[in-house]
Amino acid sequence: MPFSIATWNINSVRLRMPLVERLLAEYAPDVLCLQETKCPDDQFPSAAFRKIGYEHIAFHGQKGYHGVATVARRPLEIVEKRRFCEIDDSRHLSVRFDAGGKKVVLHNFYVPAGGDEPDVEINPKFRHKLGFVSEMNAIRADHDENSASVLVGDLNIAPLEHDVWSHKQLLNVVSHTPVETENFEAMRKAGEWVDLMRLNVPDDQKIYTWWSYRAKDWETSNRGRRLDHVWSSANLAPRLTGIEILSAARGWERPSDHVPVIARFDLD
């Protein structure tokens, strides 16, 4: 059976609910993970999701900042809302659901951006980001014959040379500095996660999921970065049938600076 998971940093779910509704109407993923919802739990637009068939909803939000949510057309069981770096800032949510005869645990992450200066001595936001990534080492791609794991979200790091528009010019820019990319890839490998977006795309090909609001013409300049990621346990990787990056969504009315990424699987 075809099965799909979408991830999108929406940059305010209430402000951009029309865009979310468009995504769900046109692409109908089975599960949608949102980041940067900027919405306290008691104000999450659950009714709007239920109206369009996404009746199963889990969220971990706060007023004005951060926040993650996972909505689905099938039952979800909340597993955990993990606290990182001893800060309560709504950056993680994990749920469990049934798909393809397996119990799938799905982690939805919004990693701190890290501020502008890549120096932990003068920038506490950057120190927080590195600490957060370090603690993510505890998130493992657990799986067996009857279970699997998926991790998605805005992880705010573009780890590979061709995950950014210019490796050379961005080496000292937060999201692509060596200390970030090396720790990030070490964390992914330690957890035995498979980078599904690179599974069938060679490392020397560009992949972007984010284009800055500061660009006058984001499409022409195309100075993007791959900040959004989709990982899985090893037993799901052979079932991947495709990854779609909806770059056109960056041109929708009042868009997020991130675009949706959809992973599709063939699950018996």
Image (cartoon, grey):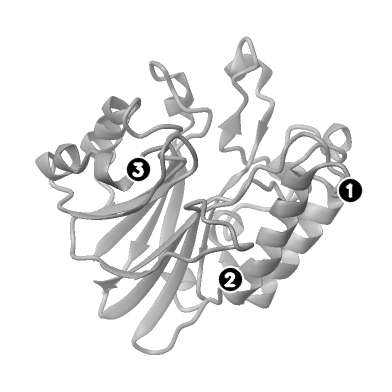
Secondary structure under tag 1 reads loop
Judge the density around disc 1: few (<14), some (14-19), many (≥20) Cα neighbours within 10 Å.
few
- Residue 58 location, x and y as percent? 29, 56
- Residue 9 location, x and y as percent? 47, 40
The residue at which mark 2 appears reads as 193
Q: Is residue 99 visible?
A: yes
The residue at which mark 1 appears reads as 121
User: Front-most of 66 and 179?
Assistant: 66
Report the residue at 85% width, 49% height from top. Answer: 120
What's the amino acid at mark 2? Trp
For marks 1 and 2, the one nearer the N-term is 1
Locate residue 107 relative to residue 123 in the image: left or right: left
- Residue 16 location, x and y as percent? 34, 27
What's the amino acid at mark 3? Pro
Image quadrant assignment for residue 206: top right
Secondary structure under tag 3 reads loop
The residue at which mark 3 appears reads as 40
Locate residue 25 relative to residue 9 in the image: left or right: left
Judge the density around disc 3: few (<14), some (14-19), many (≥20) Cα neighbours within 10 Å.
some
